[in-house]
Image (cartoon, rainbow, N blue to C red):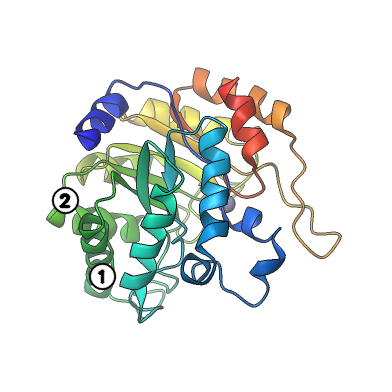
């Protein structure tokens, strides 16, 4: 029942608030030391749930699992990590929990050695775990190669009708990081292979994301997702510092909504304060 209503709400282009960053928030906790973010789902589930809950308390209806780099090629125990991650997200009380699927982390042939069928099987294994753990939707995010996105959508659609949100990471020239594919190209794949929303995450701050959202809006009738970073990272201290504050961020997000985005949230460097400011 929940998934139907999410599908309908997406299709109606209702404004849906997503969560903010997971990775940059986890790094603020000393318990993080020596643990890989995905493994924290098992070693320190309470911390992961606490970050999810901070977003739910701030008004986010959709949260995505702490599984950005989890796949069977990287983790032998990927299924165990996913079920822990879904439970951690559920424990936050979120209305909708999505399985977060990031890039496989290997370049597709001919740029790299990963074949299209390897990519498909990898995504299918993830999709099956999502179904098994009863997620409400899938989020294929930080896409850097549209061919990988296509395989992810094909694999998910083979096993599930749940909503899929597809989101790319774009460079400053407005192309996907690996292939340079423009929003129009990613939107075409989203339309053809059954995504329920398409757009951009990470990349840069909400100010620079405006032209991307405008391109998506003119290329597709699908709902558009915008999940920018809290600005460009300042690396001068040796670690990433994000400088766009909560109210400034929310101001830019309003412009992205005017440009056509309806599924909104934050990526790297955003906190519960950013999400609460958007909600206000
Ligand atoms: Zn990010």
Above or below 18: residue 173: below
Seen in the picture, residue 230 relative to 246 is either above or below; the reply is: below
List x then y, in percent, for residue 268: 62, 50
- Left or right of 41? Residue 270 is right
Numbered circle sitting on residue 160: 2
The residue to which callout 1 is attached is 116
Q: Is residue 260 visible?
A: yes
Looking at the rendered image, the quarter that the C terminus falls into is: top right
- Residue at the image point whose x is 58% and y is 41% from the top: 54
Disc 1 or disc 2, which is closer to the eye? 2
Query: In this image, 72 relative to 22: left or right?
Result: left
Q: Where does residue 28 sit, x and y in percent of width and height?
A: 71, 58
Q: Residue at x 21, y 59 (%)?
A: 132
Res 111 → quadrant: bottom left
**Which element type, helix, strand or loop, lies under badge 2?**
loop
Q: Say what secondary structure mark 1 lies in.
A: helix
| Res 266 visible | no
What whole-number distance in Å separates the C-alpha atoms at marks 1 and 2? 20 Å
């Amino acid at each position: 029942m929940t998934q139907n209503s999410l599908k309908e709400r997406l299709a109606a282009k209702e404004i849906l608030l997503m969560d903010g960053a997971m990775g940059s928030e986890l790094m603020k906790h000393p318990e993080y030391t020596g643990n890989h973010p995905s493994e924290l789902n098992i070693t320190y589930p309470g911390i992961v749930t606490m970050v999810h809950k901070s977003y739910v308390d701030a008004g986010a209806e959709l949260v995505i699992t702490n599984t950005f780099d989890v796949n069977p090629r990287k983790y032998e125990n990927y299924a165990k990590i996913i079920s822990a991650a879904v439970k951690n997200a559920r424990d936050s009380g979120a209305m909708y929990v999505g399985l977060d699927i990031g890039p496989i982390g290997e370049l597709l042939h001919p740029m790299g050695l990963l074949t299209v069928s390897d990519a498909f099987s990898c995504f299918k294994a993830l999709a099956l775990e999502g179904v098994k753990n009863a997620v409400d939707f899938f989020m294929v995010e930080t896409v850097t190669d549209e061919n990988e996105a296509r395989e992810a959508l094909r694999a998910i659609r083979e096993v599930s009708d749940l909503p899929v949100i597809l989101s790319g990471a774009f460079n400053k020239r407005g192309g996907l990081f690996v292939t340079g594919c423009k929003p129009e190209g990613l939107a075409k794949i989203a339309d053809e292979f059954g995504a329920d929303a398409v757009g951009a995450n990470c990349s840069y701050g909400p100010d620079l994301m405006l032209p991307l959202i405008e391109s998506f809006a003119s290329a597709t009738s699908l709902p558009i997702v915008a999940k920018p970073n809290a600005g460009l990272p300042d690396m001068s201290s040796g670690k990433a510092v994000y400088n766009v504050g909560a109210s400034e961020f929310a101001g830019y997000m309003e412009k992205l909504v005017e440009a056509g985005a309806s599924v909104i949230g934050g990526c790297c460097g955003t906190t519960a304060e950013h999400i609460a400011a958007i909600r206000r």
